[in-house]
């Protein structure tokens, strides 16, 4: 059985069995099975992927910028990446806000005040994170790390941009050093970075051997803890979010692929289905980065220097699904609390969501503090975030899938010169 079929099987089995066992979650031995078997299996898989994010991001960006600079292409690739990211994010937010205004899922919504009590600690944590958010000027300055090692240690806790900047600067500095040297020979350290990158891919290959079991365990744990009842009161809200994500995925992305990248959308989505399954099950763009890079080079045939640059930057800076979710959530909660947002305020929400989508951490739940910042900006009670916490995990899985798919779409749009997949380049064995 092919690996993607195993993944689908694990996904479906996890949803079904987790939902069936959910009513018995108060039974001690059932809790123990989930706590000591399912949770550790899923966490081991995720940690194997998170373990190589820092060395892979750093080596990939150094190599990518170095190779692009040698061919005078780094400025062009960076500008095109930013342009397509802003275009795709703008489409996603406008789609989400348009759907909320049309269907109005928050009208007539009855607020369950018990939600505010049971999720009080979660709200306090998210509120504190929102209060601790940096100003634009401060965030801009702190993109340049004082201590690159500290940025690497805290990369998965919100310092990924600082680590990326360091890698970008080193890659360009290596190019300048090589360019100005007398012998013009290839730097030995670049071979070391190449080996680090290749070793990271090998770890991904090993981790993928347990992926179907891990996907089953992760999804089982989610269904076991929450069941399906959480969708009863928030069905329309969830449906609007999912509809918006589907439109962005299969209409906007398909149009960009067909008319700009000159690629078949069907073939593209077929080649990337494994990555999208990983994204759905892990809810983390960062965890999917190694698999995304491997897929871009081996299945999509993208130029390695371009794909490594775009995908590593995109894991943090291209969060189309998150931007759409943030826009839908803010307007939904405005409708719930009877806050009538003017056209100007809705345009403000659009702009803030686009910017927030670029700065969202690529980890599960990374968008919640940013949603509260946007809510505060337009006068919506911060406590309202409690209403969507119950379905956030499922919707996080959905929007992460779009985020990761969007990274690959942007990489395909930026890559002018299509190269054959790496597997096709390999010479036959004697």
Image (cartoon, rainbow, N blue to C red):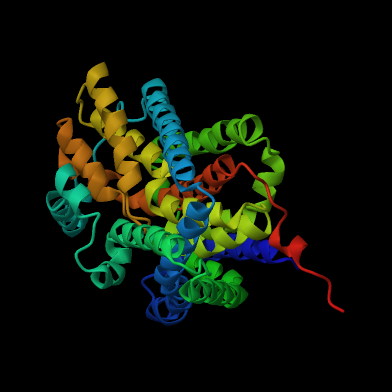
Residue 165 pos. (x, y %) = 32, 57
Looking at the figure, which quarter contains the C terminus?
bottom right
Nearest the eye: 30 or 404? 404
x%, y% of residue 170?
36, 63
Residue at 54% from the left image edge and 46% from the top image edge: 411
Residue 151 in picture, x, y percent from top left = 26, 66
Is residue 131 shown above or below 210?
above
Residue 135 visible? The answer is no
Give left or right: position of 380 versus 245.
left
- Which residue is at 40% across, 64% downward? 177
Pick out the residue farthest to the top. Answer: 343
Q: Residue furthest right?
A: 430
Q: Nearer the viewer, residue 308 or 258?
A: 308
The residue depicted at 58 percent of the width and 76 percent of the height is 202
Residue 184, placed above or below residue 393 = below
Please tell me which residue is depicted at 60% across the width and 62% down the height of the picture.
294
Up-down: is 66 above or below 336?
Answer: below
Relative placement, left or right, of 195 versus 424 is left
Q: Position of residue 239 (x, y in %)?
A: 46, 37
Q: Report the quarter where the N terminus lies.
A: bottom right
Q: Nearer the viewer, residue 65 or 297?
A: 65
Q: Is residue 391 visible from the viewing direction of this image?
A: yes
């Amino acid at each position: 059985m092919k690996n993607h079929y195993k993944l689908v099987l694990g996904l479906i089995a996890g949803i079904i069995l987790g939902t069936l066992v959910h009513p018995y979650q108060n039974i001690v031995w059932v809790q123990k099975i989930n706590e000591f078997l399912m949770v550790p299996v899923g966490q081991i898989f995720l940690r194997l992927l998170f373990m190589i994010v820092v060395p892979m991001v750093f080596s990939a960006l150094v190599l990518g910028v170095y190779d692009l600079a040698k061919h005078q292409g780094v400025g062009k690739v960076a500008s095109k990446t930013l342009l397509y990211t802003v275009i795709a994010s703008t489409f996603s937010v406008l789609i989400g806000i348009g759907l909320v205004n049309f269907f109005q899922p928050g009208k007539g919504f009855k607020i369950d005040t018990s939600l505010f009590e049971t999720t009080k600690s979660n709200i306090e944590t998210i509120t504190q994170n929102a209060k601790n958010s940096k100003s634009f000027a401060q965030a801009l300055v702190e993109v340049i790390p004082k201590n690159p090692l500290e940025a690497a240690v805290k990369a998965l806790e919100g310092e990924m941009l600082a680590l990326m900047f360091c890698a970008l600067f080193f890659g360009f500095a290596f190019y300048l050093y090589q360019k100005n040297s007398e012998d013009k020979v290839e730097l030995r350290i670049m071979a070391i970075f190449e080996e680090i990158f290749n070793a990271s891919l090998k770890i991904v290959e090993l981790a993928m051997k347990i992926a179907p079991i891990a996907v089953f365990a992760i999804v089982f744990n989610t269904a076991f803890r929450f069941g399906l009842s959480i969708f009863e009161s928030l069905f329309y809200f969830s449906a609007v979010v999912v509809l918006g994500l589907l439109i962005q995925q299969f209409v906007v992305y398909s149009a960009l692929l067909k008319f700009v990248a000159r690629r078949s959308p069907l073939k593209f989505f077929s080649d990337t289905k494994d990555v999208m399954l990983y994204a759905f099950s892990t809810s983390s763009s960062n965890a999917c980065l190694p698999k995304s890079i491997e897929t871009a080079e081996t299945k999509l045939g993208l130029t390695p220097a371009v794909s490594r640059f775009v995908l590593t930057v995109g894991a943090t800076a291209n969060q189309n699904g998150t931007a759409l979710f943030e826009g839908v959530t803010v307007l939904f909660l405005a409708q719930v609390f009877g806050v009538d947002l003017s056209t100007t305020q809705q345009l403000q929400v659009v702009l803030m969501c686009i910017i927030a989508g670029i700065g969202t951490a690529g980890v599960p739940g990374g968008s919640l503090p940013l949603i509260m910042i946007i809510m505060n900006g337009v006068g919506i009670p911060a406590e309202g975030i409690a209403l969507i916490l119950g379905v956030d995990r499922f919707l996080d899985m959905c929007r992460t899938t779009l985020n990761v798919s969007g990274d690959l779409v942007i990489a395909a749009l930026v890559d002018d010169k299509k190269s054959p997949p790496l597997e096709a380049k390999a010479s036959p064995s004697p």
